[in-house]
């Protein structure tokens, strides 16, 4: 379909030069160098022309040509980008013709004829900017995105999923619900947490900390910068410098913002000598790191320059690997399921061709990962040779409410840093041995997980997590003193509640609360004040009628403490 798109564009815009047009997960795109920007009207015209091309039932034929013939063809059509592509292609060189009028460099395969394409099952979606070869110093191109399916019904379902994803977009909801912002004046990719978002973040962090204490972890706090020599020792300066901010000179020393927390935990371990009796040691940190991201790839909370990783490192004996990995899997499930992520895709990545470490250690580590997954009872896929050069790993993707998969959790064995920093423990025989080091993150990035979570809930958060759980709506000023009494009782019970003091009419008060997705709205009029009750409207359960204040406070406290989605007030309503 991308060839049909390119042919249609060059039919309507003869001066447009073609570059690349690969397929994507949901369709295809093609990059063009065109003198004028493509408009929405242009997209409609291009789609119409594509329909005409499909209707002509043009054959697609593969031709194998010499490099010289390919170059001559390309030069004849004045396609400089294709010349550059040709220079990087190895023989055999193939072209695909579309009828007798158009052709493109391509490895294929393709359908035999455009009649196999359904003209009612494709759509041109948008135009975006793109740099040639992804290089900001090269030409700015125009990328036309499209989607193609076998049937019109599949296209309609795709459009529905896309509309649902747009409705759940965390960037829009973050603004609408006043959770966070990214301020251009401060710099791209730097997150400002607003009071409501900050309250939610605190709830998530507190839950995370308590879960880790319960699982036998201790917490660390480490600096945000370190001497440049640390990053040389760790290898980050050699292998990761493109993603690091530049160094800063302080007291005639060079310091670097940390892109990762790992070397700090390693230094903490190395600060004293450990016995085998102390292992395993489990240390966790919500550590903020800073990484350089190109302007074109940053996206809301999903890709930022400053973010907090829920890093943990386990230092253990070789024979403890299986038990420790199983403990990480159990903790991961505990935490992720608390945010209603219950479906996972698991990938086990094994030793690549280029790696460090002894064969026996690799075999033991990989066997420990497999043993833990088998004991956990989780199905997994094996990515042979997909591990890092310094150890095998497990990657966990979570499935959200509309079926999208998101990479979050990673469990990585590391034979590199213990070697670089010469880590030891004293073994039972008195010798000094190298500990096994396990990296792991459950959220991955707190910011990114927050964005995924916002989209999963569509901003309609469970009661325990909502930044504002109860909003009291006094009908008249006369009942405000009673509303304040109810507010005090709720807050004393640990419930996040406020009074709407705007003075708007009741209908508007309710609409505003619903738009802001407040879980529970409590209407208070003269009758409620007299009876010591509140008339409740729940986002999840609808109109709950009049409920005694004491019952409301008890139910709200219980739901908050047990991390419940709702209150179950139907059981306590009179």
Image (cartoon, rainbow, N blue to C red):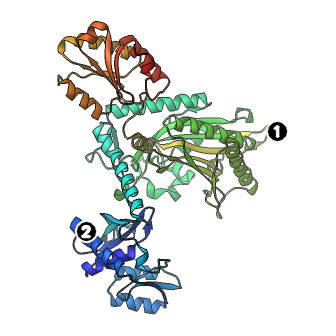
Please tell me whether residue 110 is drawn above or below residue 489 in the rendered image: below
State the count of labels: 2
Identify the image quadrant of the N terminus: bottom left
Q: Quadrant of residue 540?
A: top left
Question: Crowding at label 2, few (<14), some or many (≥20) Cα neighbours within 10 Å?
Answer: few
Question: Which residue corresponds to the image point at 27% horizontal and 7% vertical from the top-left?
Answer: 530
| Most foreground residue, 552 or 239 | 552
Q: Residue 320 location in percent, x, y?
A: 72, 40
Can you tell which of label 2 and label 1 is closer to the viewer?
2
Question: Which residue corresponds to the image point at 24% horizontal and 72% vertical from the top-left?
Answer: 45
Q: Which residue is mark 1?
A: 429
| Disc 2 to disc 1: CB gap under 8 Å | no
Q: Earlier in the sequence, mark 2 or mark 1?
A: 2
Please tell me whether residue 142 is drawn above or below residue 77 in the rendered image: above
State left or right for residue 428 relative to residue 326: right
Question: Crowding at label 1, few (<14), some or many (≥20) Cα neighbours within 10 Å?
Answer: few
Question: Which residue corresponds to the image point at 28% horizontal and 78% vertical from the top-left?
Answer: 16
Q: Residue 59 location in percent, x, y?
A: 42, 84
Q: Residue 76 location in percent, x, y?
A: 34, 91
State left or right for residue 448 relative to residue 437: left
| Most foreground residue, 101 or 448 | 101
Q: Is residue 136 visible?
A: no
State left or right for residue 109 relative to residue 36: right
Question: Which residue corresponds to the image point at 47% horizontal and 80% vertical from the top-left?
Answer: 112
Q: Quadrant of residue 489?
A: top left
State left or right for residue 352 relative to residue 530: right
Q: Which residue is mark 2?
A: 44
Please tell me whether residue 153 is drawn above or below residue 93 in the rendered image: above
Say what secondary structure mark 1 lies in.
Answer: loop
| Most foreground residue, 500 or 35 | 500
Q: CA distance from mark 2 to mark 1?
A: 77 Å
């Amino acid at each position: 379909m991308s060839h049909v798109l390119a042919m249609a564009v060059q039919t309507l815009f003869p001066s447009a030069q073609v570059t690349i047009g690969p397929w994507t997960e949901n369709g295809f795109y093609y990059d063009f160098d065109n003198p004028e920007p493509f408009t929405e009207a242009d997209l409609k015209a291009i789609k119409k022309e594509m329909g005409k091309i499909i209707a002509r039932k043009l054959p697609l034929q593969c031709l194998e040509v010499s490099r010289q013939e390919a170059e001559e063809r390309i030069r004849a059509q004045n396609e400089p980008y294709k010349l550059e592509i040709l220079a990087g292609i190895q023989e055999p060189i193939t072209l695909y013709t579309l009828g007798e009028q158009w052709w493109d460099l391509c490895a294929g395969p393709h359908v035999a004829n455009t009649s196999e394409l359904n003209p009612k099952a494709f759509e041109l979606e948008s135009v975006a900017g793109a740099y040639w070869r992804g290089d900001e110093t090269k030409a700015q191109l125009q990328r036309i995105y499209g989607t193609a399916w076998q049937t019109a019904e599949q296209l309609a379902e795709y459009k529905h999923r896309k509309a649902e994803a747009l409705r759940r977009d965390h960037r829009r909801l973050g603004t609408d619900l006043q959770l966070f912002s990214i301020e251009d004046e401060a710099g791209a990719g730097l997150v400002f947490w607003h009071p409501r978002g900050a309250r939610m973040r605190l709830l998530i962090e507190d839950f995370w900390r308590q879960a880790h204490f319960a699982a036998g972890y201790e917490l660390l706090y480490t600096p945000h910068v370190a001497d440049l020599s640390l990053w040389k020792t760790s290898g980050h300066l050699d292998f990761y410098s493109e993603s690091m901010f530049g160094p800063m000179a302080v007291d005639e020393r060079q310091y670097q913002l940390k892109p990762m927390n790992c070397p700090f935990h390693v230094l903490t371990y190395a600060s004293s000598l450990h016995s085998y009796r102390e292992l395993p040691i489990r240390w966790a940190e919500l550590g903020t790191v800073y990484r350089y991201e190109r302007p074109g790839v940053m996206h809301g909370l999903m890709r930022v320059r400053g973010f907090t990783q829920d890093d943990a490192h386990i230092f253990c004996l070789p024979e403890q690997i299986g038990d420790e990995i199983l403990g990480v899997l159990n903790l991961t499930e505990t935490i992720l399921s608390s945010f209603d992520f219950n479906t996972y895709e698991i990938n086990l990545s094994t030793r690549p061709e280029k790696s460090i470490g002894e064969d026996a250690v690799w075999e033991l580590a990989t066997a420990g990962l497999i043993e833990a997954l088998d004991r956990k009872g989780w199905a997994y896929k094996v990515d042979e040779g997909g591990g890092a050069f310094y150890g095998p790993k497990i990657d966990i993707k979570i499935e959200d409410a509309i079926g999208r998969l998101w990479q979050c959790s990673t469990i990585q064995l590391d034979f590199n840093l213990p070697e670089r920093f010469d880590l030891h423990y004293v073994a039972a025989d008195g010798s000094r041995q190298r500990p096994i080091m396990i990296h792991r993150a459950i959220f991955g990035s707190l910011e990114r997980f927050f964005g995924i979570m916002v989209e999963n809930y569509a901003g309609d958060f469970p009661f325990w997590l909502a930044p504002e759980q109860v909003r009291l709506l006094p009908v008249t000023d006369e009942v405000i003193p009673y509303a304040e009494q109810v507010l005090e009782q709720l807050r004393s019970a640990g419930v996040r509640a406020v009074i709407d003091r705007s003075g708007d009419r009741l209908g508007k008060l309710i609409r505003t609360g619903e738009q802001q997705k407040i879980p529970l709205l409590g209407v208070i009029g003269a009758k409620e004040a007299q009876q010591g009750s509140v008339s409740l409207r729940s986002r999840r359960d609808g109109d709950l009628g009049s409920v005694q204040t004491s019952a409301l406070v008890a139910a709200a406290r219980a739901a908050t403490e047990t991390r419940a989605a709702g209150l179950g007030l139907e059981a306590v309503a009179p």
